[in-house]
Image (spheres, rainbow, N blue to C red):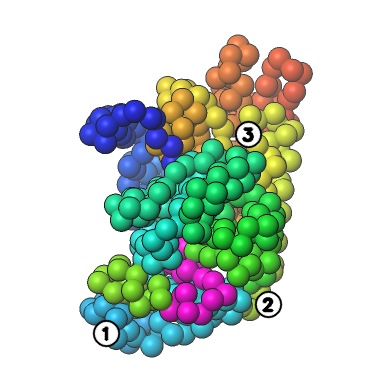
Amino acid sequence: MSTPRGLSADRLMRRFHKSVDHLRSEGVTRLLVESESPVGDSIVVDGVRLANFGSCSYLGLGTDPRLVEGAKRALDRFGTSYSSSVAYAAVGLYRSVREKLSAMLDAHVVLAPTTTLAHLAALPTLVRAGDAVLIDSAAHASMQMAVQLLIAGGTSVSQVPHSEIDELKRRVVQLLDDGAKRVWYLADGVYSMQGDVAPAHELSQLLDEHPELWVYYDDAHGFSWRGRHGRGVILDRVPWHPRMVVSVGFAKSFGCAGAAVASLDEDLVDRIELVGAPLTFGGPIPPPILGAADASADIHLSPEHPSLRDELIERISLVNRLITEFDIPSDTTNETPIWFVETGSDRTMIELTLRMKRDGFFMNVATWPAVPPGRSGVRFTVTNSHSISRIEAMLGTLAAHCRALVGTGMTIDLTSDEPVVNLGGAGTSIDVTDEYLDERRRMRS
Ligand SMILES: Cc1ncc(COP(=O)(O)O)c(C=O)c1O
């Protein structure tokens, strides 16, 4: 999340309102998925079936019958809601999910109803008087929101340029020289718009060099599909460090909703549980969601998980290979299931999204404040629910539209069933397979 400097909160809110209102009127956001086509690799919007390249259910668990069954069992036993703060009492599934999460992450964990609430509970508990906070400029809005509480409480909070480790080192040293007792650095594990990963190795090295530094990660997008038992991108890349806190979200790859904050320090986790305001004064994770989380954790701890994980990793490699082959302007170095095609202007972003939508592919727009002003783009995700041919079809179409929009003069007729999409200019052509054409026919029918 990135905010233009020098604008009042009121002007920012008005600008934000104008922007989202425009996107809604263009038909690229706030779509309603029709109920007869719940989820999976396609959705029906306004009567039209679209291949869904905007879902974060990376392992495809959101529709897994075992999660659905787990939710139903909990629903039958406990009803739709156990209406009490966990400070008083919680259904027994809380303990089961917590123990399983603890086994997945090899750490102590506290559960929260959402990742956003996890940050709001954890950060004011963790950051003490005299500490200073540095937050990555691209860190998710949920953490940017949580640091407002710290600012209100008098903590010095400042942004550091996105993943610039040298600048971060300089600022840590400076804050400590200026008398900060400890410095916290807040970063996403996987950045939700661009799909890039925090420089975990360098950050662990920095933790070793500075005993007063702590790192708090939000690995909502890295959790469940990467690492042993799906422990996430960060814990797959670096071992636990005593001064590292990792929050994970259940609403993406894990297939339900909820979150956990994890650390090696049992007291610290206990403190978040006991005094984190939203965990004490707010409601619990509803029983059906706990039931689904419990079933999802079982899958993550079972011998099945590595094959689910590898299936997604194969798809990520395929997308990266095709992006390079088709010369699509997107980063292929992230090795995460999120890609970003930067268009710069909102106008081109909307045009590209609408062209893809007309051709049967749903993708996400990404504009300010989710990305810096003037750096808008189209973001797409890939999940285990996508067939290989559907991924190929989407990337062939995207390549053609990107070429057309960057002004090569190329236009293509996607309503024709010509077997070759000629990308023109650079002598590149994509041989469109029979599956591609079948896929397009299926989507149009
Ligand atoms: C990196 C990141 N953190 C947190 C959240 C918020 O998650 P939750 O819905 O669990 O609050 C999101 C949601 O999209 C996210 O992308």
Q: Quadrant of residue 48?
A: top left
User: Label 2, on which residue?
Assistant: 303
User: Label 1, on which residue?
Assistant: 88
The circle drawn on residue 147 is none
Taking 367 as reference, is 168 left or right? right
Which class describes the residues within 10 Å of circle 2: few (<14), some (14-19), or many (20+)? few
Give the percent coordinates (x, y) of residue 98. 47, 80
- Vertical arrangement, residue 343 with respect to residue 82, above or below: above
User: Label 3, on which residue?
Assistant: 330
Q: Is residue 85 visible?
A: yes
Q: CA distance from mark 2 to mark 1?
A: 36 Å
Callout 3 secondary element: loop
Give the percent coordinates (x, y) of residue 218. 50, 57
Q: CA distance from mark 3 to mark 2?
A: 34 Å
Name which residue lies at 46% across and 69% down. 260
Name which residue lies at 42% across and 48% down. 157
- Vertical arrangement, residue 425 with respect to residue 270, above or below: above
Q: CA distance from mark 1 to mark 3?
A: 49 Å
Magenta-span inclusion, residue 324: no
> What stretch of residues is rendered in magenta?
249-270
Callout 2 secondary element: loop
| Position of the N terminus by quadrant | top left
The extreme right residue here reads 427
Amino acid type shown at disc 1:
Tyr
- Vertical arrangement, residue 291 with respect to residue 193, above or below: below
Q: Is residue 315 visible?
A: no
Amino acid type shown at disc 3:
Ser
